[in-house]
Amino acid sequence: MTTFEPSAPAPLRLASVPLRVAPALFATTLFVSALLLFAVQPMFTKMLLPRLGGAPAVWSVAIVVFQAALLLGYAYAHLVTRMLRPGLAALVHLAVLAAASLALPIGLARGFEMPPESGVVLWLVGLIAASIGLPFAALSASAPLLQSWFAASGHPQARNPYVLYAASNVGSFAALIAYPFLIEPLLTLRTQAWAWSLGYAVLACMIAVAGLLVARGAQTATAATLASAPAPTLKERLVWVTLAAIPSGLVVAVTAHITTEVAAAPFLWVVPLALYLLTFVAVFRDRPWISHDAAVRLAPFAVVPLAIGIFDGSRSLWLIVILLNLAAFFLLTLACHGEIYRRRPPPARLTEFYLWLSFGGVVGGVFAGLVAPNVFPSTYEYQILIVAALLALPGTFAGGWRKWATGGAWLAAALAALAIPRLVFDARLPDAAAPALQVAAIALGTLMLLQRHRPARLAGLVVVAFTLIELWRPGLVRIETARSFFGVHQVVESADGRFRLLFHGATIHGAERIGEAGPRPQPRTYYYFGGPISEAIEAARATQGGLRSVGVIGLGTGSLACHQKPDEAWTFFEIDPEVARIARDPRLFSFLGRCAPGSPVVLGDARLTLPAAPRPFDVIVLDAFSSDSIPVHLLTREAFAGYLSRLSPGGTIVLHISNRHLELVRVVAAVAAAEGLVAWLKQDVSVTDPREELHANALVAALARKPADLGDVPNRPGWRRIESDIAPWTDDYSDILGALLRKKFGR
């Protein structure tokens, strides 16, 4: 551990009154700087969604780019601090802020209108860098610069400028909490961008005042204190990087996990990042809110339930699952950041310290956001980072390497005993084995808690638990796993061998009976013949005297292809190439091959590809909202304007809006009214035993320009007209939080 004695302050040359206000001025300036820095992240990323389908990976990649810009800003701050006196450094920084202001107001850079079919990540990195890279990097440099200037100011409190880092993170936390609850519901994106630009100008003025205040009193302080501070060793720097990388990777991994389960929306993006920043506020102080020892003691109690998957099988407990993930993330991050603060260097090494922390942040973010999605078939980076955080707890390596080798032997034996029967001999657990597996998991969890004071052994047991839950899931047998920019897809078979299903996250995207006889397989889940989706298509077919062309947004397994009739031209629009590959593979699903072998599958975001279709459609089916991570940009007025541009006269738009967490009926009704459409809705209740034929009750809306275009839909049982009392969503405004609250609590 690095310890230091506070260096003596420089001679006081400032007037007493300005000197007294220095702490408040610097703290306020840091607060505003952080407020702007972290308000722009969800704001700008929300601007990206209409071009990238709302995938959780958009936020993951954006975090990595923001971390890289932060590193660039910290490197610039470190160089300026070492090369220039505070007064001259302030002038240089003001010039940099002025140059960065030429990129304002914030918006999407030109030349990035259409994402490519491949290389989306590199395209996205370029778009973010070109649009916001310079202003973000310039703002990032403000925090270490201001803290270093304050350290050299000669003020008595300058002995420990690290407390200002807490003020900075309070601003970051405030921005991330304010965005989903105040900024997003009340302001359009355009208004947000102009308000942010005004705040940027105010901050530049505050930085100028702070630079003027410290300029005369710190002519020689930096050089003097730097000479007296020992340089950190390579080992110390590596420890800083490691302790910073683990939480940084975790914030990307846990955000991707949570947003896949609910929605790609700023209010969920910001929660893990806000907790991440809150840990800095809590521990970067002389009297931490939660002691380092307490965080280390509490972390296992949150990690163990996650490791044994105690709530994995219950969708009704989704909120508990999210809170448990956030609690484990918070405590592990708190432990890592507490250890970082314990190992902080003297103030003279402050900018270098933050530079190494920022580098660690980039390392963790790149691993979780860029490397892992291209290396692992599933989200294994989350489990890896949890184990890494446990290994970072104090005392892990206290027993020496020999003890570690002994522990590695039993761990390897346990993993082999779990993996070989499943992977080599294809052993499977029937549904009836679920209670026994739960008992085994709880027993393993109890053993983990008994070993919580031994971090290395605890980490090993967590690895065993993750392996047990991953390989031995009763009732379902994994056939194939595929990962893309847009998520993780799993093809599984039921334990009885009757059905094959496609999962995206925890959501079923279609199912087929294995070996079904006949020329055409029967659609399952929400798409069964006689369900509300089927009714809406049949009504349109009868009203229009047959359908010439149909456009379907969202492919899944291709179940809807079997609703196609001879002489009808159906076109499927799918954003994820992996989904298209799975649906076309006859070894996995046969809907496309047997029901619509000639139907094209157009890859890309339907917001861009459907309006470019060569022919109008008599029916447009939107089947992109059953996943819990919904593409918000497909429910805006701009999106519907695109649909209507390719909807033939008398045509119908059918929306499948079944969703566990979001109330979308009012959203659809509002945008329909805004576009002059009539809207009818049906909640299917006919399926009482979904396990028998794998049918599922769907919530479906049918929209048309006038009532007659819907045919007999209004007269069919269960259909009702819907209206809305909320504002329609646009690319400039949406309220995911409101949809979540309506679903949870009603009106």
Image (tube, rainbow, N blue to C red):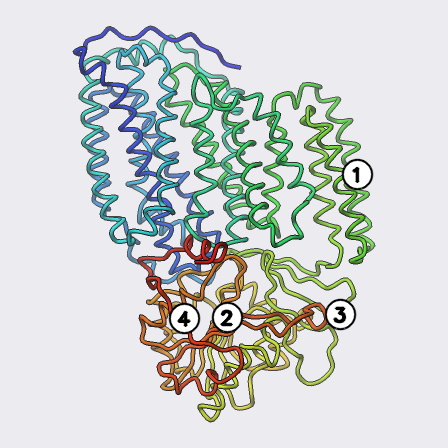
Asked if residue 651 is positioned above or below residue 362 in the image, the reply reads below
Q: In this image, 703 relative to 290: left or right?
A: left
Which residue is at the far bottom? 545
| In front of the other: 680 or 233 | 680
Mark 2, secondary structure of its residue: strand
Asked if residue 315 is positioned above or below residue 531 in the image, the reply reads above
Q: Which residue is drawn at 72% across and 71% down?
A: 692
Mark 1, secondary structure of its residue: helix
Badge 4, how many Cα within 10 Å: few under 14, some, many 20+? some
Q: Of label 2 and label 1, which has the lower sequence position?
A: 1
Residue 82 picture location, percent across and down: 31, 20
Asked whether disc 4 touches disc 2, contact meaning CB atoms under 8 Å apart, the reply is no
Looking at the rendered structure, the number of numbered marks drawn on it comes to 4
Q: Residue at x 45, y 26 (%)?
A: 282
Residue designated by label 2: 656
Which residue is at the far front? 747
Residue designated by label 3: 498
Asked if residue 270 is positioned above or below residue 406 in the image, the reply reads below
Q: Which of marks 4 and 2 is in front?
A: 2
Residue designated by label 1: 414
Q: How far apart are marks 4 and 1 (CA)?
A: 50 Å
Q: How far apart are marks 4 and 3 (CA)?
A: 36 Å
Residue 390 picture location, percent across and down: 62, 30
Q: How far apart are marks 2 and 1 (CA)?
A: 45 Å
Q: Nearer the viewer, mark 3 or mark 1?
A: 3
Mark 3, secondary structure of its residue: loop
Q: Name the residue type under label 2.
A: His
Q: Of label 3 and label 2, which has the lower sequence position?
A: 3
Residue 423 seen in this snapshot: no
Asked whether disc 4 touches disc 3, contact meaning CB atoms under 8 Å apart, the reply is no
Residue designated by label 4: 609
